[in-house]
Amino acid sequence: MENDSATSAVSVALGSPPRVGFAGAAAATRTDLEAVYRRHGPRLWRAVYAYAQDRDIADDAVAEAFAQALRRGKAIRSPDRWVWKAAFRIAAGRLKESRRGLPMIDAPLVRNPEPAWELIAALHELPERTRRCLVLHYYGGYRTDEIARMLGSTPGGVRMQLTRGRRRLRQLLAGGDGHG
Amino acid sequence: MDDLRRRFEALDWIETPYQWPDIEARVRRENRTVRSPGLHGPLLGLATAAAVLVSAVGFAAGQWLPGLSAALRWAFGGAGYPRPVTPDDVSVLATAVAGTAGASVLAAAGAAFVWRWMSRSLRSRRSMIEVRGGGMQTMSETAEEHISGEVARTNRWRRLSMVVLLAAIVAAGTWLLVDNLVKSDIEALIEDYGTAWETNDPALLRSVVTDDYTLRDLRDGTDITLEGIDTELGLYEVYGFTMEARGELIVNGTMASQSQTVSFRTDTFEGFSVFEIEDGKISRHVLVFVERP
């Protein structure tokens, strides 16, 4: 797998996660979609990786989501949102099919291991649905109603998952008992 | 909440692969596996529609079996199904041809259908996308278990197609067999009828004709009709004749016809007989004179 220094080495500035958006989203030509990928692909990959905690699944889900978006072309009105939704669904399907425990994070992937390792390890301890809600909300920047539409759930259900997840995640991060 | 948001921002330190070349490769791979628009599909649909149409016409006209039988006779030889009574009738011939054509095209369409499924099975080994439960799932080339599952599903369809085709062939064969057995009964009936006249056997004659059986004799411009079995039996020994078949017995529904040499005690001529069958017995026999040898 090739690494692109322009996209992989640059970390997103701290602060509020950027709300993914694509100007003139009505037309998803190859060039447009490549621009979407360059802008949001790395963040999407990290989000899927944090959720699935499997490099292969993240690779496959993100690549396939963009490939399907490319095939659909102009039929997709908002490619950025569409690929997020598609990638998480693909990853969820792959996780369900694999029916195996989550692997531990691949350490060499992390340039600055400490904070990322702690978070990944803590997420590892959470239920799959809770983990997905937390990643989409805190890293993807999606609102509860948007997450509910993605997951086929209700905003109330998502809020409940977030509440439980926040409480448990804080415990894990504070106590350091989240390491596998 | 901000504390968790900052925690998640740590994910930005994770290196990510540059996947755009892989994304484009996936699209190219999928495009290769998607069949380009061609005439194969429309032609197959057209052939199937034509087959259904001509078969329906042939079946509705009652000439489906003669047509199918003609095809089998052509392929394997043998007696097959009897030809229509009036082979010169264009409408009968046309429906017989339609039946044959329908059977042939249906067989070709079935073979093409099976071939198509086999081809799809081979293509599915290269690249497959599975859409399930409204969501999208990818199947990477390394996911052999997915490929095995897809191939198994394809095989299931292929097996189903073969079973349907086999059932159709068995049904058609059974239909032909039953129909030929019915024809054999009529042949035996006509033979017994001829034997009864030839051997002057009243009991046998009574067993093969109905009570209101009529014999009409059209010879040299005469038109003699004998009505009722008792009338015939009164003239039985005087009127006795033998029938020697000169051609194949032709059966169509309740009518049967055969070219014959008919010998009376004082006369012999070549002509043909037309029999009307009712409840498995002869209800009417017309002797038609053609020429004296």
Image (spheres, coloured by chain):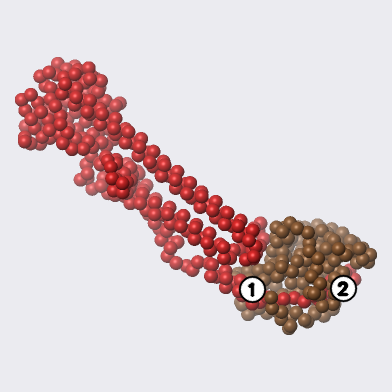
Chain colours: A brown, B red
Residue A145 x/y as whole percent: 77, 63
Q: Which residue is mark 1?
A: B23
Q: Using the image, tell me which numbered label, if any, was put on residue A115.
A: 2
Viewer-proximal residue among B217 and B194: B194
Local SS, label 2: helix
Left or right: B202 with respect to B119?
Answer: left
Residue B263 x/y as whole percent: 10, 28
Q: Using the image, tell me which numbered label, if any, was put on residue A8.
A: none
Q: Is residue B267 visible?
A: yes
Q: Residue at x 77, y 81 (%)?
A: A9
Local SS, label 1: helix
Chain under disc 1: B
- The residue at the far bottom in this view is A6
Q: CA distance from mark 2 to mark 1?
A: 30 Å
Q: Is residue B221 visible?
A: no
Amino acid at pointer 1: Ile
Asked where in the image residue A101 lies, by quadrant, the reply is bottom right
Q: Residue at x 84, y 60 (%)?
A: A126
Residue A45 x/y as whole percent: 74, 72
